[in-house]
Image (cartoon, rainbow, N blue to C red):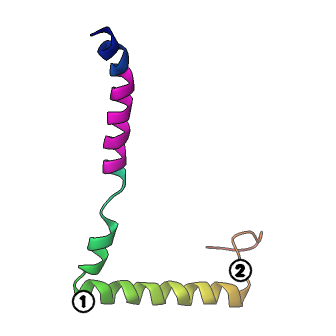
Amino acid sequence: MERLIALLPVLGCLAMGVMMWLMMRGQHGPTQHGLDPATQEEINRLRAEVALLKQDRTTTGHDAGEPGARP
């Protein structure tokens, strides 16, 4: 009985670690494959827009680090 009482903190830590791992690992795989075509099309459109904005930012020479740059 004393041995069980001495092991309870260790078992508690292990149980909490397993529970945290299960909660934090997420469900990233299946959700990305289950997107409907309209959502995927919107994501692709937004990615293309971001790419154009990045390209425009590099071609104009305005960078966040420049003193005269405006957002």
Q: Secondary structure at mark 1?
A: helix
Check disc 1 and give the amino acid type: Pro
Residue at the spot of label 1: 37
Residue 25: percent from the left, percent from the top? Answer: 36, 56
The quarter holding residue 43 reads bottom left
Magenta segment, which residues?
A: 9-22
Identify the residue at horizontal 34%, vertical 42% (top origin).
18
- Image quadrant for the C terminus? bottom right
Residue 14: percent from the left, percent from the top? Answer: 37, 34
Q: Nearer the viewer, residue 27 or 65?
A: 27
Q: Main secondary structure of the magenta part?
A: helix
Q: Residue furthest top?
A: 2
Q: Nearer the viewer, residue 1 or 28?
A: 1
Identify the residue at horizontal 54%, vertical 87% (top origin).
51
Q: Is residue 41 above or below residue 1?
A: below
Asked if residue 43 lies left or right of residue 37, the reply is right
Residue 15: percent from the left, percent from the top? Answer: 32, 35
The quarter holding residue 2 reads top left
Disc 1 residue crowd, few under 14, some 14–19, many 20+, Cα 10 Å: few
Q: Is residue 8 above or below residue 40?
A: above
Residue at the spot of label 2: 62
Q: Is residue 5 above or below residue 42?
A: above
Asked if residue 56 lies left or right of residue 40, the reply is right
- Mark 1 or mark 2, whichever is nearer to me: 1
Asked if residue 43 lies left or right of residue 65, the reply is left
Q: Is residue 20 above or below residue 37?
A: above
Is residue 17 a member of the stretch shown in magenta? yes
Identify the residue at horizontal 74%, vertical 69% (top origin).
65
User: Which badge, 1 or 2, comes first in the chain's sequence?
Assistant: 1
Disc 2 residue crowd, few under 14, some 14–19, many 20+, Cα 10 Å: some
Check disc 2 and give the amino acid type: His
Q: CA distance from mark 1 to mark 2?
A: 36 Å
